[in-house]
Amino acid sequence: MSKKLGLALGAGGARGCAHIGFLQALEEEGIRPDIITGCSMGAVVGGAYASGMTVEDLLSTVRELKTSDLIDLDGMAITKLALFKGNKVRKILLSKFGDVTFDKLSIPFACYAVDILGGRLTLLDEGSVADAVRASSAIPTVFRPVQHGDMLLVDGGVLCRVPVKHCREMGADVVIAFDVLSNTGERVDKVPNIIAKVLRVYDIMDYNQNEFAKRDFKDSYNLWLSPPMDGLSAYNVKDAEKAYELGYAYSKEHMPEIKELLSDC
């Protein structure tokens, strides 16, 4: 019996487009995941792929995307819950996912968000995939939280950057983590404004959480891949294409390790 492959796709904003390169490299080797988990941008890419979007579809979307497509410049909500309402993000997600629900996905998929009322990590694996992915990628203070029942949900990356543990629990024999935030803890020269300061705090959290995850959940993954993303911002969509290229090249380099893990020998 062949081994079940699970992919845990991590948070990372524009850097998360490296996940598309990872999927492209796997496809070229005839490797298709049996399970996908994701947080934040990893949830966006993973959910889209699990719903049937091709790598070409994902790349086309990324190449067409502009910052103005994501933020509601005409509807800032600074005095309420966030800088931007997130309506444009919701519109994009609905245009790509439609009304597909988790039980209709071609690949089993789950993602995480954080309930800021209950103060806990929340697994999303039922109902609307578009709504779940939106919640998992709602960066706190930047995009408005998503109401889900009695919960108020924000980006799952706040507490879980690379969801390896649940990927294993979903039945994956081989879990490969794909982490695009490996160097975000490095020193920067300046943080010029309040938004940059907030995002810099997230960068530091990203780096440290991933280091803890690699240590604390080492039994939950078989391979932790961290492509070099030097010079690329998680918050600039102009870096998305380069992130894809780096993710693809890095994945091709590590393909022998992946194939060995999947071998029945």
Image: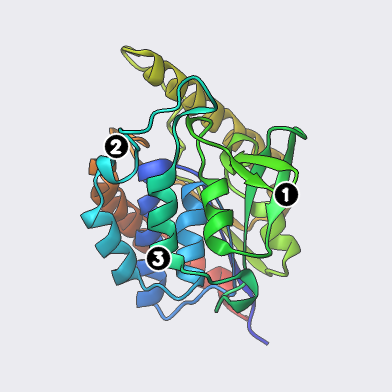
**Earlier-in-chain disc, 1 versus 3:** 3
Q: CA distance from mark 1 to mark 3?
A: 24 Å
Q: Circle 3 is placed at which residue position? A: 96
Residue plotted at (46% across, 37% down): 182
Quadrant in which the C terminus is drawn: bottom right
Image location (x, y in percent) of residue 25: 36, 68
Q: Residues within 10 Å of mark 3 (few under 14, many from 20)?
A: some
Callout 2: helix, strand or loop? Answer: loop
Q: Look at discs 2 and 3 and give the one toward the viewer.
A: 3
Residue found at the very far front of the displayed protein: 75
Image vertical order of residue 64 relative to residue 264, above or below? above
Q: Nearer the viewer, residue 76 or 137?
A: 76
Image location (x, y in percent) of residue 133: 53, 54
Amino acid type of the residue tagged 1 in the rendering: Gly
Inspect this view and state whether residue 227 appears.
no
Image marks 2 and 3: residues in contact by CB distance under 8 Å: no
Residue plotted at (46% across, 38% down): 181
Name the image quarter holding residue 75: top left
Callout 1: helix, strand or loop? Answer: loop
Image location (x, y in percent) of residue 91: 40, 55
Q: Circle 2 is placed at which residue position? A: 236
